[in-house]
Amino acid sequence: MINGLPGETHEMMVENVRRCVTDNDIQGIKLHLLHLMTNTRMQRDYHEGRLQLMSQDEYVRVICDQMEIIPKHIVIHRITGDAPRDMLIGLMWSLNKWEALNSIEMEMRRRGSVQGCKAVKQEFENEKTT
């Protein structure tokens, strides 16, 4: 799933993951952030002020909220992604993957959270059958 699509709110990103894990029989999920690349329409929209990109702090909050609702039996394969450095315009902070991953880990610890700690009952019932 790509987080930070144009017009997408924090609540929408969390709800998209909630629907994905409750409406589908999945074993794993990959979470990505939107990368702004050269020579795209989004590049023009960004330069004209019509596209807002997520800060690292915003992304960390979204990912942590999503991890809390993903049941423990679902493998989170990825929580960030890579883009070619020479083509990347936006989310330059994503180039330092370890800093982003450490920030996510620190926020989960600060919250006292673990994956699935806020998964809804239906998600836990699905977990019991697998």
Image: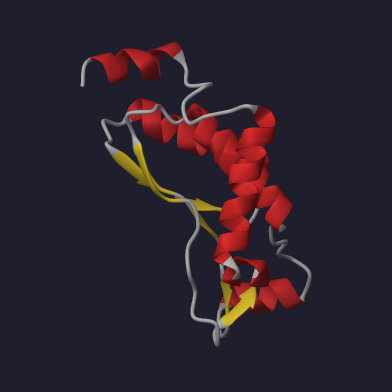
Q: Name the one closer to the observer, 19 or 114.
A: 114
Residue 75 relative to residue 5: left or right: left
- Image point 58% across, 83% down: which residue? 38
Query: For residue 19, which quarter of the picture?
Result: top left
Can residue 8 be seen from the camera position used here? no
Residue 99 picture location, percent across and down: 63, 60
Q: Residue furthest left?
A: 130
Can residue 50 be seen from the camera position used here? yes
Residue 74 relative to residue 67: left or right: left
Residue 56 picture location, percent across and down: 69, 57
Above or below residue 91? Residue 123 is above
Q: Name the one closer to the observer, 125 or 24.
A: 125
Quadrant placement of the C terminus: top left
Residue 15 picture location, percent across and down: 54, 33
Residue 85 picture location, percent across and down: 54, 82
Above or below residue 59? Residue 25 is above
- Image point 55% across, 79% down: which residue? 40
Q: Name the one closer to the observer, 20 or 100.
A: 100
Query: For residue 71, which quarter of the picture?
Result: top left
